[in-house]
Amino acid sequence: MIEAEATYEIVKKSTDNSTSLVEAVKGLEMAEKRVTELNAEGPDQYFVFDPAKASVVEPSEPGVAIDPFAP
C-alpha cells in the first residue's frame, strides 16, 4: 500500500493583518518551497498551515512570525 503525502495549506497574512487561504499542496517540502516563492514576491506574508494538526508549521526562515494569526 502506498502512503499518500499529507496536504498542507498555504495561507496569506496581508499587511492589514487579515488572513486568507491561497492554495493547498501535497507534501511539506513543496509547501515550504511555495511559501518561499510567495514571500519573495511582495509585502504580504505567507505561511504553511497543517490542517490535520490545526496548527501553523514553524517557519524555517528568520523574520517570519511564529504566530501569523496574531495581530
Image (spheres, helix red, strand yellow):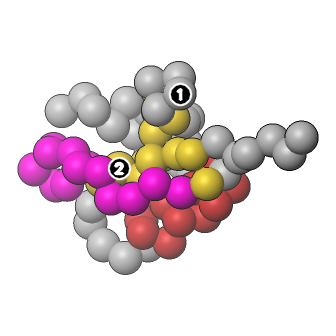
* Pointer 2 local density, CA inside 10 Å: few below 14, some 14–19, many at least 20: many
Residue 60 visible in this rendered orientation of the protein: no
Q: Which residues are magenta?
A: 13-25
Q: Which mark is residue 11?
A: 2
Q: Residue at x 21, y 45 (%)?
A: 19
Q: Position of residue 62 (x, y in %)?
A: 54, 48
Asked whether 54 falls inside the magenta stretch, the response is no
* Quarter of the rendering occupied by the C terminus: top left
Q: Amino acid at mark 1?
A: Ala
* Pointer 1 local density, CA inside 10 Å: few below 14, some 14–19, many at least 20: few
Of labels 1 and 2, the one closer to you: 1
Q: Residue at x 64, y 60 (%)?
A: 30
Q: Secondary structure at mark 2?
A: strand
Which residue, as the protein is rendered here, is positioned at the far top?
Answer: 53
Which residue, as the protein is rendered here, is positioned at the far bottom?
Answer: 41
Q: Residue at x 46, y 39 (%)?
A: 49
Q: Is residue 40 left or right of residue 62?
A: left
Q: Is residue 53 left or right of residue 41?
A: right
User: Distance between the Cα atoms at labels 1 and 2?
Assistant: 15 Å
Whether residues under marks 1 and 2 lie with C-beta atoms below 8 angstroms apart, the answer is no
Q: Amino acid at mark 2?
A: Val
* Quarter of the rendering occupied by the N terminus: top right
User: On the image, numbered disc 1 is attached to which residue?
Assistant: 52
